[in-house]
Image: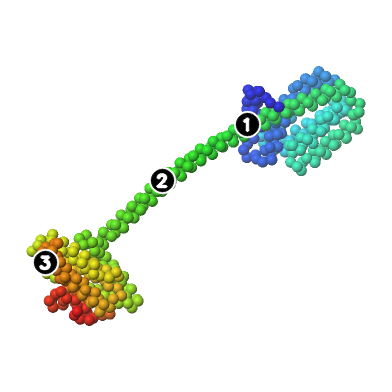
């Protein structure tokens, strides 16, 4: 059944008020109660035209019309009970109206009419729709009782065609009104569902777009943060490296040596492997600064560091202690081996040509060596190497002396 657009919109707004329930009423209870309100409203609407039909076509309208119009009172009672959340009781009140109609004849005419049988099938049908399952059997029993009473007291087989037609019109009016109300309610429900689905699709699309934009921003921001973190790590590593590097020669500095020698020394004690330390000092370097200026002296220091570093092994580490003094850490190296390494460095430096800096200049170095075989503390190791360096200086310079093996 279709209703014109304007009437449908008006009917939908009206039906929304008719079947409105609190949100906490959910599930089957909500569906049954909304159906009850819709059908009860339809019956109440049909009461007026039914009363007109009864008044025009049924004998003794003064007795029958009030019974029809009492449906309005039942409707008011149903609305009151529903507002108080007495849903099942409201459904029974509605069914009691249809139970009363077949028995109306006992109240006003001394007995029921044969056409009252037409109203009895409504009882179990409505019960199945409106009541919980455990109440339906009770409603069917009431309908059967009504049927027995009417069949025994009224001549069902003696119903005339005209009388049957009139009562059929009454039933059709009631059913038609119910169909109208329920159609409007169902149409409204489908429209609401459609509108909700369309809105849900729109919101889903917007959410997907928003998620895509957010994911893009997050990826972009994550990339930026990762790049910034890498830059910061690189800068931190560079800064940390700068703090342990000598700016003039590019070698590690005294700070790095202090950390490294302590670690190497502890490992040597634990493992039993030897550790040798050589302290190297350029001979008569002050005369280079005084004669050729500090700028030339810096060039000589850089060149000396390069020559010495090219002469060491891969496991050794050369550091600049400060001024013209260097240190060489030689893990896993005995005193004899250290002397061999340092003597090769001494000879290479002494044979180096310095013409690219200053013609006629020569540079030599003295070496003092100590190993863990003769000392048990880092400070003792450094002191022993320094003492051997002083001995090498006193003995004529350009020499390699070791605390455990003597002069080279």
What residue is pinned by disc 3?
361
Q: Which mark is residue 172?
A: none
Say whether disc 2 or disc 3 marks the residue closer to the N-terminus. Answer: 2
Label 2, label 3: how far apart the Cα atoms are: 60 Å
Asked if disc 2 and disc 3 are in contact, CB closer than 8 Å, the reply is no
* Element on which disc 1 rests: helix
Q: Tell me if 137 is positioned left or right of 258 in this view.
A: right
| Left or right of residue 95, residue 269 in this image | left
Is 60 rendered above or below residue 255? above
Judged from this view, the residue extending furthest toward the bottom is 405
Q: Which of 90 and 402 is in front in this view?
A: 402
Residue at 82%, 25% in the rendered image: 168
* Residue with the mark numbered 1: 191
Disc 3 versus disc 1: distance between alpha carbons?
103 Å
The part of the image, by quadrant, that contains residue 171 is: top right
Q: What element carries label 2?
A: helix
**Left or right: where does residue 288 sit relative to residue 18?**
left
Image point (70%, 34%), residue name: 35
The image quadrant that residue 105 belongs to is top right
**Closer to the observer: label 3 or label 1?**
3
């Amino acid at each position: 059944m279709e209703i014109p657009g304007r009437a449908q919109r008006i009917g939908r707004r009206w039906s929304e008020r008719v079947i409105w329930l609190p949100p906490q009423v959910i599930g089957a209870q909500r569906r049954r109660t909304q159906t009850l309100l819709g059908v009860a409203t339809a019956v109440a609407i049909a009461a007026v035209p039914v009363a007109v039909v009864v008044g025009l076509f049924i004998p003794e309208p003064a007795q029958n019309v009030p019974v029809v119009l009492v449906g309005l009172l039942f409707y008011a009672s149903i609305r009151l009970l529903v507002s108080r959340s007495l849903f099942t009781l409201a459904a029974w009140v509605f069914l009691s109206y249809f139970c009363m109609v077949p028995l109306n004849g006992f109240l006003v005419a001394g007995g029921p009419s044969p056409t009252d049988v037409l109203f009895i099938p409504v009882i179990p049908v409505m019960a199945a729709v409106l009541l919980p399952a455990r109440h339906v059997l009770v409603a069917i029993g009431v309908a059967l009782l009504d049927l027995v009473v009417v069949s025994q007291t009224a001549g069902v087989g003696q119903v005339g065609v005209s009388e049957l037609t009139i009562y059929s019109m009454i039933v059709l009016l009631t059913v038609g009104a119910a169909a109208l109300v329920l159609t409007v309610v169902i149409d409204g429900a489908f429209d609401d569902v459609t509108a909700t689905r369309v809105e849900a699709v729109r919101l889903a699309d917007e959410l997907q777009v928003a998620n895509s934009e957010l994911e893009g921003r997050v990826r972009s921001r994550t990339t930026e943060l990762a790049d910034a973190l890498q830059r910061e790590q690189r800068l931190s590593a560079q800064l940390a490296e700068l703090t342990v590097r000598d700016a003039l020669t590019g070698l590690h500095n005294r700070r790095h040596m202090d950390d490294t020698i302590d670690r190497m020394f502890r490992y040597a004690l634990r493992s039993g492997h030897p550790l040798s330390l050589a302290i190297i000092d350029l001979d008569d370097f002050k005369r280079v600064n005084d004669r050729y200026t500090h700028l030339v002296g810096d060039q000589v220091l850089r060149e000396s560091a390069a020559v010495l570093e090219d002469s060491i092994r891969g496991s050794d580490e050369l550091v600049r202690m400060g001024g013209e003094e260097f240190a060489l850490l030689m893990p896993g190296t005995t005193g004899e081996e250290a002397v061999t390494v340092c003597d090769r460095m001494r000879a290479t430096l002494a044979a180096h040509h310095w013409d690219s800096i200053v013609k006629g200049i020569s540079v030599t170095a003295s070496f003092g060596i100590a190993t863990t075989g003769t000392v048990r503390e880092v400070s003792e190791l450094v002191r022993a190497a320094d003492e051997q360096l002083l001995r090498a200086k006193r003995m004529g310079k350009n020499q390699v002396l070791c605390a455990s093996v003597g002069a080279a």
